[in-house]
Structures are given as C-alpha cells and as structure tokens.
Image (cartoon, rainbow, N blue to C red):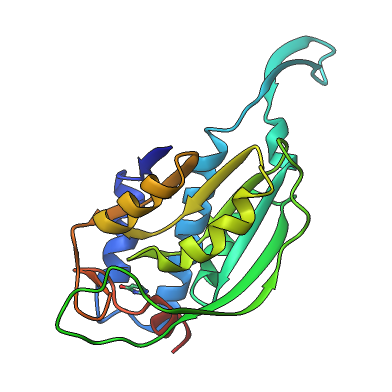
Amino acid sequence: MSLAILSEPLPISILTQLRDKKTDSTTFRKGLVRLGRLIGYEIANTMDYKKVEIETPLNVKAEGIRIYDLENVIVVSVLRAATPLVEGLLKAFSAAKLGVIGASRREYEGKEIPNNMEIDVFYKKIPPIRKGIDNVIIADPMVATASTLLKVLPEIAIAKPKRICIASVLASDYGIKRIMKNYKQVDIFTVAVDKELNNRGYIVPGLGDAGDRAFG
Ligand code: URA
C-alpha cells in the first residue's frame, strides 16, 4: 500500500481552481480532465518496464525502456463524477480497457460526522481482470468516507490483478486510513489530502459536490 500525493505546482494550481466556488462548470470539468492526465502520468511512472535496444533512423543502436504494463491497464470509472477524470486518464493509458460502475451516495445529514455512507450501485460492467497481469485503476475523484470504494474494491480484489491503484483528486485522512486498513495492497494517488469531513460526509475544505459542479 502506498500513498502518492501530487504536490507539484501544476496539479496544485488546477486543484486550487477546482476548489474555488467561482469556477464555472466547463472550467471545472476541464480541470478534472487535466488532473486525470497528470495522475495517469504519475501512475505510469511507477509501472514496471524493461530495458530495450532499438535502432534509430541513423542505423545506430540506442538503449531505452518499454513500459510493458501500459498494455495491461483497466480503468474503472465510478459514475458520474469520475467521467472527466477518466477522460484525462485515458490520455495517459490509450490502450486501457474501461469498466464502469454507476454508484450514488444517499443524501445524509446528521449531527455526527458519518463514518460510512449508504451507497446504491445501479450499474456495473467491468472487463475480465487477468490475474497477476492487469493493473486496475479505479477513478474516484473524491475519497471522503471511502464508502463507494469499499463497495467496488471487493469485486476487483477477488480477481487478484497485478496491481490496484486509486486515482483521486481529493481524499480525506479518514477515507485513506479506511482503505489502508481493509486493502493493504492498494496504491492511492491523489492531489491533496484534506483533514476533515462534515456532517453530510463532504470533504472540508474540499471542492463541493464534484459531480454537480462538473455537470451543472
Ligand atoms: N463527493 C463529492 O463530490 N464531494 C465530497 O466532498 C465528498 C464526496
């Protein structure tokens, strides 16, 4: 299990735009696409590769590498907020297969900060996962209580892929700990970690409801 935080200026500046309540829907959506691409490259940089030798047009040999795992990627989109993030991820993983999970959290508002949210899964279509070969990347821009991911992960983990990554924009401390406790083999990539959740299960300071903001 690892946690990678994309703390470079470019992802942080895009995240700042997403956090800003004045940012309109189109800019918000484009920001998620751009972050998807950056997170994708970050994941690709951690993938297995092998050394290769090629011949250049000058008929001279040169050493290089080939990231063979780029051909073994399944991106799983958790609808609806992940859609723009996945558009970006697919720019980094153009050969990826695509799975889709339609899930929505039931609205909740209580006195206590929730430690779990009720999730309704209404659609699921995931390509066959090859044991020990495929790298499954689950795209979920907001890991708050991680309730959605904990609904999705059992089905992925049981197929024993080579690797499971989570591509997220914002994650809470609580959500990360909850995933770590249950799935020691998962690698989380996120742009930032926020400390708090509120009594509706939203990340604070967060960026609001990512799906509503992206789709209007
Ligand atoms: N989903 C969102 O869109 N935003 C949050 O803050 C938490 C979950």
Q: Give the answer, above or below, for where 22 lies relative to 51.
A: below
Q: Give the answer, above or below, for where 109 lies relative to 75.
A: below
Q: Where residue 91 sits in the image (x, y, percent)?
A: 63, 54
22 sits to left or right of 85: left
Which residue is at the front of the view, 77 or 56? 77
Q: Where residue 5 sits in the image (x, y, percent)?
A: 34, 44
Which residue is at the front of the view, 126 or 216? 126
- Residue 71 is drawn in which quadrant? top right
Quarter of the picture containing the N terminus is: top left
186 sits to left or right of 11: right
85 sits to left or right of 142: right
Which residue is at the front of the view, 195 or 46? 195
89 sits to left or right of 134: left
Taking the view exactly as shown, the residue that stands out farthest to the top is: 61
State the residue at coordinates (25%, 54%): 173
- Residue 20 is drawn in which quadrant? bottom left
Q: Give the answer, above or below, for where 204 lies relative to 120.
A: above
State the residue at coordinates (71%, 52%): 96
Does residue 92 appear in this view? no
Q: Where residue 70 sits in the image (x, y, percent)?
A: 69, 40
Does residue 79 appear in this view? yes
Quarter of the picture containing the C terminus is: bottom left
State the residue at coordinates (55%, 69%): 78
Ligand 1 shows up in the quarter that is: bottom left
Q: Give the answer, above or below, for where 179 lies relative to 41.
A: below
